[in-house]
């Protein structure tokens, strides 16, 4: 009985060490790039003083978000364990790069919300904004 407990303990330790041993450098780099993208997006939206200029900004950045999503999916193909949402969250929460990304995204989202309130009466803005929101839902 004692031997079984020791074996289970060894397997548990090996499992924890092997999970933490994965560094996921591509994921770390993706969060660095995405953080910068959302900082740039926020700054560009801050300068948008009309609905037309805000739409122009969205048309520049929405394809960049699509590229981010594509890269994230490629990383999940390379590391299938990251397809499991709980594992992905656990892994990301341990990464400093993710924490920075999360802060940058939060600041972007606040700015995007303010811009949406300002220009949401414009039909072109509203349509492009809906595209962007759908993309953002695919990030997480």
Image (cartoon, rainbow, N blue to C red):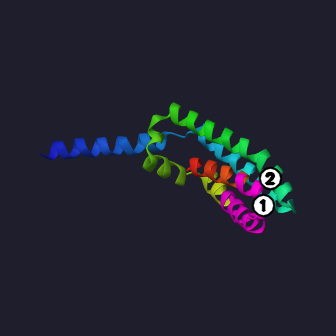
Looking at the image, residue 109 lies above or below residue 139: below
Residue 94: tell me if it is visible.
no
Q: Picture coordinates of residue 23 (x, y %)?
A: 54, 40
Q: Picture coordinates of residue 53 (x, y %)?
A: 86, 55
Question: Does the magenta run of residues contain 27?
Answer: no
| Residue numbers of the magenta segment | 104-127
Question: Does the magenta run of residues contain 121?
Answer: yes
Q: Picture coordinates of residue 98 (x, y %)?
A: 61, 52
The structure residue drawn at horizontal position 74% and vertical position 50%, both measured from the top left corner, is 36
Which numbered mark, 1 or 2, is in the foreground of this view?
1
Q: Which residue is mark 2?
A: 55
Q: Residue furthest left?
A: 1
The structure residue drawn at horizontal position 72% and vertical position 41%, both measured from the top left corner, is 63
Q: Is residue 140 left or right of residue 101?
A: left
Residue 81: tell me if it is visible.
yes
Q: Secondary structure beneath disc 2?
A: helix
Check whether the beta carbons of the residues at disc 1 and disc 2 lie within 8 A of each other: yes
Q: Which mark is residue 33?
A: none
Prevailing secondary structure of the magenta residues: helix
Q: Which mark is residue 122?
A: 1
Q: Secondary structure beneath disc 1?
A: loop
Marks 1 and 2, the one that precedes in the sequence: 2
Circle 1 Cα neighbour tier, 10 Å, few/some/many (<14 / 14–19 / ≥20): some
The structure residue drawn at horizontal position 49% and vertical position 34%, both measured from the top left corner, is 79
Task: Pick whichever, 110 or 134, lies toward us.
Answer: 134
Task: Pick whichever, 135 or 39, lies toward us.
Answer: 135
Circle 2 Cα neighbour tier, 10 Å, few/some/many (<14 / 14–19 / ≥20): many
The answer for how far apart the CA atoms under marks 1 and 2 are is 10 Å
Q: Picture coordinates of residue 65 (x, y %)?
A: 68, 45
Looking at the image, residue 9 lies above or below residue 123: above
Q: Quadrant of the N terminus?
A: top left
């Amino acid at each position: 009985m004692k031997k079984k407990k020791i074996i289970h303990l060894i397997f548990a330790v090996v499992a924890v060490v092997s999970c933490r041993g994965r560094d996921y450098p591509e994921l770390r780099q993706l969060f660095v790039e995405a953080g910068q993208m959302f900082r740039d997006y926020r700054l560009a939206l801050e300068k948008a003083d009309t609905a037309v200029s805000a739409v122009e900004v969205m048309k520049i950045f929405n394809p960049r978000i699509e590229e981010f999503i594509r890269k994230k999916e490629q990383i999940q193909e390379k590391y299938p364990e990251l397809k499991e949402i709980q594992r992905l969250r656990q892994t990301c929460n341990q990464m400093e790069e993710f924490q920075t990304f999360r802060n940058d995204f939060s600041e972007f989202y606040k700015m995007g919300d303010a811009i949406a309130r300002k220009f949401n009466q414009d039909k072109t803005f509203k349509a492009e904004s809906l595209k962007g929101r759908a993309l953002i839902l695919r990030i997480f």
